[in-house]
Image (cartoon, coloured by chain):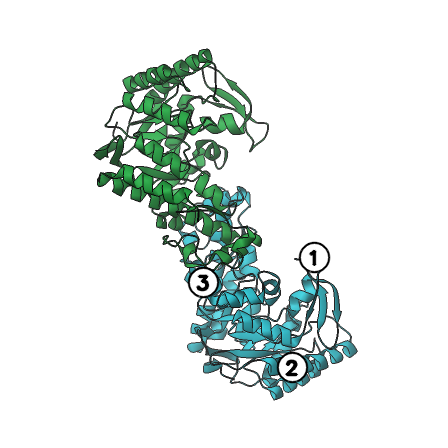
Chain colours: A cyan, B green
Amino acid sequence: MSLKFDLITTDGNARRGTVHTAHGDFQTPAFMAVGTAATVKALTMDQVAATGTQVILGNTYHLMMRPGGELVEQMGGLHKFSGWHGPILTDSGGFQVMSLSSLTKMKEEGVEFTSHIDGGIKHFLTPEKSVQIQHQLDSNITMVLDECLHLPAPREKVEKNVEMVTRWAKRSREAFVDRDGYGIFGIVQGADFKDLREKSAHELTEIGFDGYAVGGLAVGEPQDVMFDMIAHTTPFLPTDKPRYLMGVGTPLDILGAVERGIDMFDCVMPTRAGRTAQAFTRHGTLNLRNAKHRDDSAPLDDKCGCPACKLSRAYIHHLTKCNEILGATLLTQHNLWFYQDLMRDVRTAIEQGRFAEFKKEFIENYTNKD
Amino acid sequence: MSLKFDLITTDGNARRGTVHTAHGDFQTPAFMAVGTAATVKALTMDQVAATGTQVILGNTYHLMMRPGGELVEQMGGLHKFSGWHGPILTDSGGFQVMSLSSLTKMKEEGVEFTSHIDGGIKHFLTPEKSVQIQHQLDSNITMVLDECLHLPAPREKVEKNVEMVTRWAKRSREAFVDRDGYGIFGIVQGADFKDLREKSAHELTEIGFDGYAVGGLAVGEPQDVMFDMIAHTTPFLPTDKPRYLMGVGTPLDILGAVERGIDMFDCVMPTRAGRTAQAFTRHGTLNLRNAKHRDDSAPLDDKCGCPACKLSRAYIHHLTKCNEILGATLLTQHNLWFYQDLMRDVRTAIEQGRFAEFKKEFIENYTNKD
């Protein structure tokens, strides 16, 4: 295995590190922009890079459907195909199989499903197949295929889930082809059972991965349950490997998870919000369709350096009212910029040993709308 | 009147010039990107500027509806509102009143209509009101309100139209407030009656404008009729003022019109085509949704320097199949880039006295698909 991770410093349980890949480094804690179908929706890759984004996430499920792993491989991999030349992590496809497919059947061998995209055609995804597709994509970080349960779930079901996740993780690890600057991450499951989280973490660590995700969270459970599960999982993970909280989250989710030892995040929130007229700001979120912005000459966030913040809320309001594509583009870039500013500030705060103080200040600003 | 135009050189009837405005110069022959609602659809203004676009067109009709002239004025004008700091020309709103409105009633005083946007509210646009709105927008080049007839039209109707266009042009000219670097253009009508075109040109020249549009063309008539009318109008226009062919057109339309003495163009074609998966190339147009592009690693146009042409047709095909916003953005920027490359080549060819040769070569490439 040859994905290098340097843990630079810690502040409490918060960690500051660097992940080195064949396509460059990224600094942790890191927020990965979601680039579902080989595009971070509504942005060019130059616009993504300008936000401070260092690593993007591709969705294996979407890419295996369109344009297909073979085609991406033939086109020289996802980096060349999409024009994003930095690090790329891909998920396994498992989460979307559960959430977007129908007629899903879990079997020991893999998962059978029909897709929302090509409607009706039967697909079969196995741990090996998922890894192979991620190889075709030339993903720097491959995720193992797992089964993500809805919470709450009965203990017996979770026990069986954890056991299968381990068996699939082993098969994934074996199917993974080691290459310099590429790695594969295991995914800890166990729902909200602390002992099962510990068991899952131990079993995955025993197999040995380049990083570990805390999976099965941010699926509807209260924030305190999520924080509790993170706090009970990270102590059982090796300190010299990055830890990834999948699909998270709000700025406050991220701060709470960093505090509990998480290094990597991804979430559709900033990009999806940008396409529905929502803006993240240091004083909370704004709905730009709201008539109160009609004649507001202020920028979205006066501390933000993004292109949208050289313009007025009135202009963005106008664009969203007219359903102009540029409204989605400007807001998406602004929101990613905001998230990456947050991550940069988080990293600086950890380096300076004042993460707790930074977190308190950020939350005060963010939740006190004036 | 104080919009300065320098005619630098000519090559046959083709002209090479510079228009100087309060917001900078633009070189002619010029193609203006259409920025209907204070945005060139699907692009940031930085992306527009990168194409080589030097001047954009705003639609008074759309802007008076949303967000309204008062609001744009309150926000500091269209340049500041939209973030486009170069020259802006605005149309009078007349064309959209005819094409997009219902219950339109022409009166001597002005035109009454109900809008497709605010459905049901009655509006009344006069020559004075149109000029005033264009002042509120801080437009560098104001267009007079006219009435655009559908072709063919009976002579009697066209005669009446030309007379009213002159009366309205006078009223517009009187309502226009002279300022350094701002100007107002008259619009020659006369349908396909050469003597009426001449009469209209004379009457407008007598009033005196900063430039002259050849109006009422590109509304469905054959290309040779359009070329014929241009050839019969431009000799009656002053050589020291720019000439503008509104709403034109294809690359071949533009070449034929430049050859007949036109300096300025605008058209939705490159931008609209970009949102419907069409690409302009030196070898004609492409439909990127076509399955033959699925695995084509070639760029849209190997002589183009735009960001889309650093990527493959396969990638753009994928984006258009997935209805990704980025597909529209990349194709729109590419198409504008193509148009601006064409205009730059046109200007260079005129300077070098080889416009006819250039035109012949371009058309050979453009129409010979291999």
Task: Give the residue displayed 68% in from the left and 63% down from the top.
Answer: A99
Which residue is drawn at the image coordinates 46% and 19% (left, top)?
A: B110
Chain bearing mark 1: A
User: Is residue B125 rendered to the left or right of residue A97?
Assistant: left
Looking at the picture, which amino acid does disc 2 mark? Arg
The numbered mark, 3 or 1, whose residue comes first in the sequence reads 3
Subunit that carries the residue with mark 2: A
Q: Is residue B280 visible?
A: yes
Badge count: 3
Q: CA distance from mark 3 to mark 1?
A: 29 Å
Looking at the picture, how far across and down is residue B315, in whole percent?
Answer: 50, 58
Q: Secondary structure at mark 1?
A: loop
Q: Residue furthest top?
A: B156
The reply to whether discs 3 and 2 touch (Cβ–Cβ < 8 Å) is: no
Residue for badge 1: A119
Q: Which residue is mark 2?
A: A171
Q: Earlier in the sequence, mark 2 or mark 1?
A: 1
Question: Mark 1 is on which residue type?
Answer: Gly
The residue pinned by badge 3 equals A83
